Structures are given as structure tokens and as C-alpha cells.
Amino acid sequence: MKITNATVNIASPGRNFVTLKIETDEGIYGLGDGTLNGRELAVASYLTDHVIPCIIGRDPFQTEDIWQYLYRGAYWRRGPVTMTAIAAVDVALWDIKGKALNTPVYNLLGGKSRDGVMVYAHANGKDVDAALEDVARHKDLGYKAIRVQSGIPGLSSTYGVAKGTGRYEPAERGLPHEYEWSSELYLRHVPNLFERVRAEFGEELHLLHDCHHRLAPIEAGRLGKELEPFHLFWMEDPTPAELQEGFKVIRGHTTTPIAVGEVFNSVWDAHELIRNQWIDYLRMTLVHGGGITHLKKTADFAAMYHVRTGFHGATDLSPVTMAAALHFDTAVHNFGIQEHMPHTDETDAVFPHSYKFRDGMMYPGDAPGLGVDLDEKLAAKYPYQRAYLPVNRKLDGTLTDW
Ligand code: EZ4
Ligand code: CO
């Protein structure tokens, strides 16, 4: 089998997505997600101008050699644009393999290790009462694990909380919007939020929280310690992770489990975190972490250090990534949990898929390959729209981590 053609589709059904379609001489094609939130066109160009010309004529079954060719062969290694482009190719090739062998991708990764994949939902509200209502709503939908974020008294807006009555979507149309931040106000508020959630819902629900890289390590240590009575499933991205040793400080102060890495793109972003057992869950996922080929090796390495997977699954990860993640989660032994932020109806219509949600769990379905498609005619009705993630400023105007 040979790769004969590859095309990049850029569409905005509810939000922007970049999708790679790789075609073969046997009529089988595969899909890969190349969406990098707020930087979509850079990946599209990397694919169209630099990657696609190099893969035409190759054997699509050679996922290992093609991965090495695009990684080592580029000389310039790593980085989110490069690794997202490599991931798009890699995932599309696994899709082709599954279709060619007439089997779901999970069977190529070790087969089913579990019947279903536990997912967590996002609950949020402008204040604690509204957040509690949203937790109740998600519990009624069947979720067994729920991430809780709420507005912070004294701040006009914050990460994870919907602005109006609509759903929360981090990227906003136009140029970057500016948000306010104060770690002091945040640290004062969050323990109260979780005290109220546990008092109302008891111990059974798994509770998660995303600090979204805003704290210094010692502040994160304090928060983790104060959250201990509420038994969180995890505290996510407590501090920016360029300095991997920062997590040693956090670990020294709290038993609240730590998840990190939705912005990672290589095992080298996490190898100190993993081998020193400073984290419990790794969030680096297929689309930004070099695809199935690199994540499988990373997950196997993490397993030796009791680190489990907790894949990023926000709306900027397209249904192609969601499908691929569910196959991976079904097969990999050290699966922990999968994030689930449902896509809009427009997105779901452009990407018909066989995965399903039922009673707090998701299932990849048994279609050959990934079980997801791209309706190119419908996608053409939704042209790309410029959108960015917000930026964050402290109350005195200093730019800080969003
Ligand atoms: O901010 O996906 O845990 N989920 C998250 C997301 C990220 C966005 C960035 O593109 O942190 O909301
Ligand atoms: Co996050």
C-alpha cells in the first residue's frame, strides 16, 4: 500500500479545527487531527509546505519509520507546531492500518484492557451556588467524575467559567481577550468551594480541579494541603512545568494527587516528573504529543513509575482526537481517566463518529480504524475564523500565566 495524496482541511464548525486526510492507492484513507488552539494555521502550513511532500509514496503501515523520519529527520526537534503536525500524520496512519486490517485501533494497541473509559465532565458557575447547581446537573447526566471551577470573589472573570449563560469555551473570536488574576484571592476561595461540594454531594463523586498553571510551587503546595480533607481525584497543572523540579516542592507538601501536561509535546517535557514520581497523572495527549506512536512509549515509561494517563479532552481537541484517545484509553494498561468536554452539534455533524457516552463512561465503538469521518461538504460551510486563547494580567497589570 502507498500514500498517494494528503490534504489539510481547515474549518470552523463552532470552533476551528485542522484535519489531515491521508489517501492511499487502495482507496482507504485515514484522518488525523492537527488542531493547535489559536495557532491553527502554523500547523496547517507545516503540514502542507513541509510534511506532505515527504510522505507521498511511502508505505502507510510504516508508522515507526515515518514518525522517526518526521522527528529526527527534521533536525529541528519538538515544539507544539512540529509535534502536532507529526501527530496528525501518525494518527491518520493508525486509522489507515485499522481500516486495512478491518479492526478497531484498540486491537492494534493491545486489545481491550477495560470495557469502558471513565470520563470527567466540567462543571462551573459564576459563584459557588451556581457551580453546585452545575455539579448536580452533570451528576444527573451520569458522570462519576466532575471537574469543578467557579468565579472568584473580587475577579471579574477567570479560567473555566462561562461568561454568559452559554457553555464555557476558552478560545474567543478576534484578538486575545484579557483576563484578571490574583493568586491571593484564588487561594482564599478554592478550599471553600470544595468544602461546599463535598458537603452537598458526599464522598462518592470523583472531584477534580484545574489550577491552569497559575501558582508558584509553594502556593500549590499550600492549596493541595488545604484540599486534602476533600479527597480530590487530582489537582491539575498547579504550576507552569518548564521547571520540572518545581513539582518536588509541591510533592513535599501534599498528598493531593497531581496531574500535569496538557501543553507538553514530548516525553522529554515529563521525564523528570515521571522518574522522580512527582506526578500521578500525565495529560499530554495524542494531538499535541506526537500521536499514538509517541504516547504509547511515554505511557509505558510512565507505568513503571505508577503514573497513569489522564488525557486532555477539551473542545479544541477534535472528534478525531477524541476517537483516537478512546481507543488508546481502552487498550493502555495504566489508563487513569479521560477528560470529556462535549463538542457542539455543528462539530459533531462535521465529524460523524461511532464513539458514545453512556452512564459516565465512553466507548470507542467497533468500527474499523478510529471510527470517525469528516464531512468535507458540510465543513466547507464553516470557514476558518481568527480566534485566540485569552491572556492574563495580575491586578497591577503584570502579564502572567493564563
Ligand atoms: O485551557 O484546551 O483542562 N482543560 C483545559 C482546557 C485548555 C484548552 C486550551 O486550548 O485546561 O480548557
Ligand atoms: Co487543563
Image: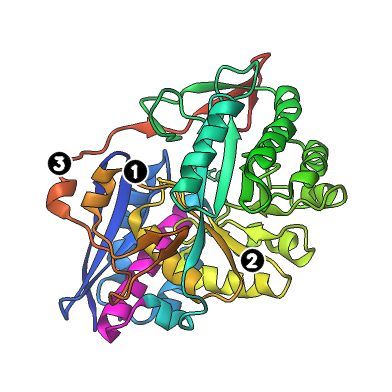
For ligand 2, give the image quadrant.
Answer: top right
Query: Coloring scheme of the render?
Result: rainbow
Question: Looking at the image, which residue sits at the far right?
Answer: 252
Q: Residue at x 43, y 63 (%)?
A: 362
Sequence order check, earlier mark of 2 and 1: 1
Cα distance between the residues tagged 2 and 1: 32 Å
**Quadrant assignment, res 227:** top right
What secondary structure is marked by label 1? helix
Q: Is residue 131 magenta?
A: no
Q: Which residue is mark 1?
A: 41
Crowding at label 3, few (<14), some or many (≥20) Cα neighbours within 10 Å? few
Q: Is mark 1 within 8 Å of ligand 1?
A: no
Seen from the viewer's position, the closer of residues 348 and 385 is 348
Q: Which residue is mark 3?
A: 381
Amino acid type indicated by mark 3: Lys
Q: Quadrant of the N terminus?
A: bottom left
Query: Residue 301 in the image: x percent, y percent?
Result: 65, 73
Sequence order check, earlier mark of 3 and 2: 2
Amino acid type indicated by mark 2: Arg
Query: Residue 203 in the image: x percent, y percent?
Result: 68, 51
Specify the label residue 308 is tagged with: 2
Q: Residue at x 15, y 41 (%)?
A: 381
Asked whether residue 302 appears in the rendered view, the answer is: yes
- Residues drawn in magenta: 81-104
